[in-house]
Amino acid sequence: MDNHKEITNPHTFFETELQKAKAAEQIAQDRSNLLSIGRVVAFLSIFGTLWIGNKTGQSEWGIGALIALVLFLILMRLQQTAKRKRNFQRNIQTINDDEIERLSFRFKRKDTGIHYQEKNHAFATDLDIFGEYSLYRVLNRTRTAEGSRRLANWLKNHAPLEEILMRQEAVEEFKNNPEFRQTWEATALLHEHAAQQVSAFRDWASETLPDSLQTSLRWRFWSLATLLIAGLTFAGLIPAWVLILSLTWHLLILKRYKEVLQGLTSRTTALGLTLSAYADLLDIADAATFRSRWWKQRQTLIRGAAHSLRKSGVLFERLDYHNNPYFLVFVSIPTLWDLYCLAGLEKWKKSHKDDLNTWLNVLADIEAMNSLAGNAFAYPEHTVPQVTWQKDVYIEATQMGHPLIPKEKRVSNHFNMNGLGHTILVTGSNMSGKSTFLRTIGLNLVLAQMGAVVSAAKFACAPVRVFSSMRTQDSLEESTSSFYAELKRLRQLLELADEKNQSPVFYLLDEILKGTNSADRHKGAEALIRQLHTKSSAGLVSTHDLELGEWGATESYVHNFHFRSDVENGQLKFDYQLHDGICKSFNASELMRMMGIDIDMQNS
């Protein structure tokens, strides 16, 4: 694996891989078709040779039938391999087609991550972390339930500084190996259903047999005595009733385990497929040659894991033979087959129960890392942020843009903030870009603190706890108004800012206290900013309240910036650029006129 391969154009790479996969799929399909014809010929040959042998009475034809049977089985195995290669190449096409669409912010995958949303999360709802058009959809390249949950967790929880730095190293390494990432995704898609059923496997691994049943498993060795009795019976040395009595004892033993075995055999197929899926992925991970600290920590934890999972998979497969009635009568009952399988699975659980959680955690981490690296690969203009320890709020960004806006439409801004207790007031007209700018800062901070690249030419920050209040809504369930909901949100902010031994809070407040009259709104906003000045926090407040901006100009810890709009030839023009000072131009009157409201009309 080449860890330093340079890819200059993501779109070209995805398109090339798409065409290569189409050609490879056709080759695999042609081979599968040819092998299918061979299987039919071999199958017919079995019956043909048996028929000729029966007619002629020549035993040589029986040997021919045996050879045809062996050939049939070989061709069947080869066709299965060809179909797997074909399906793998189809998955590669799916992945690259998805990547091409994603470059234009069109999402083909249905998963929006909305089920990971938390009602009172500090920032997830306001910053579009999950949803139809969200950061989760831009990043998500996971293909298992475990990986999806891990990515969501990284998005909702800022990582410690050391972990951020290690993830950044790993992102760079994974980014330069798109073949590894796509092989991983395509392999996971081969077992797409099974890879989502890991919860069933976790449930099984946490289940324990009652002590009485655990002890009774020793009776499985009675089958050895039964085999001896059977040999003596067929030799005429002991009567047949002894064998019948011994087999009856088998049935009584198995009856004790009937409920356990039924519950287990009802899900052997799902569990077996899950084991196969995760064993294949662990093989890929184990063979990788990455060198970053983040990777080495995890690769050490999964040495030999694929072999162990396959070992339990074999036991599940053997237990599944129970469903064949002939096997049940002639093998399973006489040998107590199911108890041997059950004992093997219980032994596996005792040896690897704790390991299993570790292995699944590593797999989930790799999937989340694939998502961060895939995003870095797809957007080479994004930069690796410099995250350094500092007790104060520190952000310095050059040409910072909104990561959910396409490059050709994105307007970037410079921004910097350093210290605690400071509030930046952002005034501006409607639709001028205030809320979008607040989300721009928030989203890039979320990306920086999960180890991802950010949408900026240069970005440096210190760890902070992002908090936002931008989309407070009323709640019929709780009988609260939107104004009261916002007050509860602001109380949450004040409580966070009072917490000791934590990173400072960086807040993003959009049009605060808008649910009350202008006098109370101004008084409340001023009081809130004064209170936040004394706490471990700093941030931005957007407002239409010019008086609040004028008050802020008199305070050393409040700084005024604005977005503006201009009217040219009856059309509103926005530059979406951040300017110093309080906004002097507002467009509400012009917008009302454009909508047909004559605001100049006097009472008659």
Image: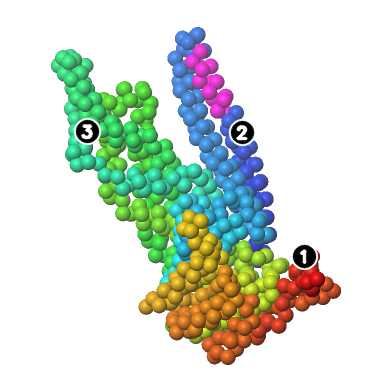
Q: Earlier in the sequence, mark 3 or mark 2?
A: 2
Q: Earlier in the sequence, mark 2 or mark 1?
A: 2
Most common SS among magenta residues: helix
- Residue 77: x and y, percent? 50, 35
> Residue 56's spot in the image, x, y percent?
49, 9
Colour mapping = rainbow
Residue lying at the far front in this picture: please name it. Answer: 604
Looking at the image, is 319 positioned above or below residue 159? above
Q: What is the three-letter code of the residue carrying label 2?
A: Asn
> Which residues are drawn in magenta?
38-51
In the image, which is nearer the foreground, mark 3 or mark 1? 1
Identify the residue position indicated by label 2 in the image.
33
Q: Is residue 41 magenta?
A: yes
Q: For mark 1, what is the residue? A: 595
Residue depth check, mark 2 versus mark 1: number of the one nearer the observer: 1
Q: CA distance from mark 2 to mark 1?
A: 65 Å
**Which of the marked residues, 3 or 1, is nearer the chain's N terminus?**
3
Image side of residue 438 versus residue 229, left or right: right
Whether 423 is drawn above or below 473: the answer is below
Instruction: Give the image location of residue 16, x and y in percent.
Output: 67, 55
Categorize mark 3 by other alpha carbons within 10 Å: few (<14), some (14-19), many (20+).
some
Nearer the viewer's eye, disc 3 or disc 2?
Answer: 3
How crowded is the residue under tag 1: few (<14 C-alpha within 10 Å), some, or many (20+)?
few
Name the secondary structure under disc 1.
loop
Q: Which residue is identified by label 3?
A: 220
